[in-house]
Image (spheres, rainbow, N blue to C red):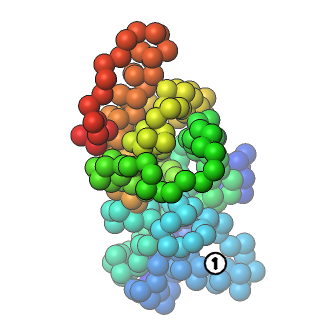
Amino acid sequence: MKFTLKIWRQQGPDDKGRFVTYQAHEVSPDMSFLEMLDSVNQGLIVKGEEPVAFEHDCREGICGSCSLVINGVPHGPERGIATCQLYMRRFSDGATITIEPWRARAFPIIKDLVVDRRALDRVMQAGGYISVNTGGAVDGNVVLIGKDQAETAMDAASCIGCGACVAACKNASAMLFVAAKVSHLASLPQGKPERTRRVTAMMEAMDREGFGACGNQYECEAVCPKSISVRFIATLNREYLRAGVVESGAPTVPEAPHAESD
């Protein structure tokens, strides 16, 4: 197989940047998208040219670092996978493929296809953890958690923090990312004591980083490599409203069991 690649090249954050056209020849249909880029880079190195910078690590759909917009879609045309899990057989032989980095103010370009995604880390650092003093280690079965709660928490915890939701949203919103992190901890007993402080701190951090508001068009769910549902954004909104009520001192209505999994 062979392809025409239009790849975004940019030397640094202050460089203007441009698309450069490359040819990819003798591409096996069983190559992953990143392996195809490896092959292109090897050809550039042989010719004495600078290879294309792109980020990768595990190449197993776990780390979330393979942040590429392929033909206008974060992670490419297949749903529920990261770029590293996309294979070249998905494209027609001879096709033209456009490859860009994430496009968001909160994700400044470092070089070529590599962006600085540390804004998501700072949002997590603002409150995405529990710090309850538990004393010595206890048996894992001491705190009983219902099946629905456990499954809801695991669904939210599957977020790998890649930022595809931000790249897909016209407002560059990080709501799905924050919703997954908040919902994960709010669904479990261990996360309940700090739920008010956590959601407030993470929402404020999201605003400080320059992420936009949710557009309610579900682009985030469509491109998420872990297929995280937008229903978690509803959970995030409920948690944030609840935090506002608690901080105001108004009485709250006791929540129904497993409310987060509805």
Q: Amino acid at mark 1?
A: Asn
In the displayed structure, 87 sits above or below 176; it is below
From the top left corner, tell me how far across and down residue 189 is, in percent: 43, 41
Inspect this view and state whether residue 232 appears: yes
Front residue of this view, candidates 170 and 98: 170
Inspect this view and state whether residue 17 appears: no
From the top left corner, tell me how far across and down residue 116 is, in percent: 65, 50
Q: Secondary structure at mark 1?
A: helix
Which residue lies at the image location 72% right of the left edge and 53% below the top edge? 12
From the top left corner, tell me how far across and down residue 31 is, in percent: 46, 84
Q: Which residue is mark 1?
A: 41
In the displayed structure, 77 sits above or below 200; it is below
Q: Residue furthest right?
A: 48
Front residue of this view, candidates 256 and 48: 256
Left or right: residue 237 compared with residue 67: left
Front residue of this view, candidates 108 and 191: 191
Where is residue 22, by image quadrant? bottom right
> The N terminus appears in which quarter of the rendering?
bottom left
Left or right: residue 260 compared with residue 156: left
Which residue lies at the image location 40% right of the left edge and 34% below the top edge? 236
Where is residue 184, by image quadrant? top left
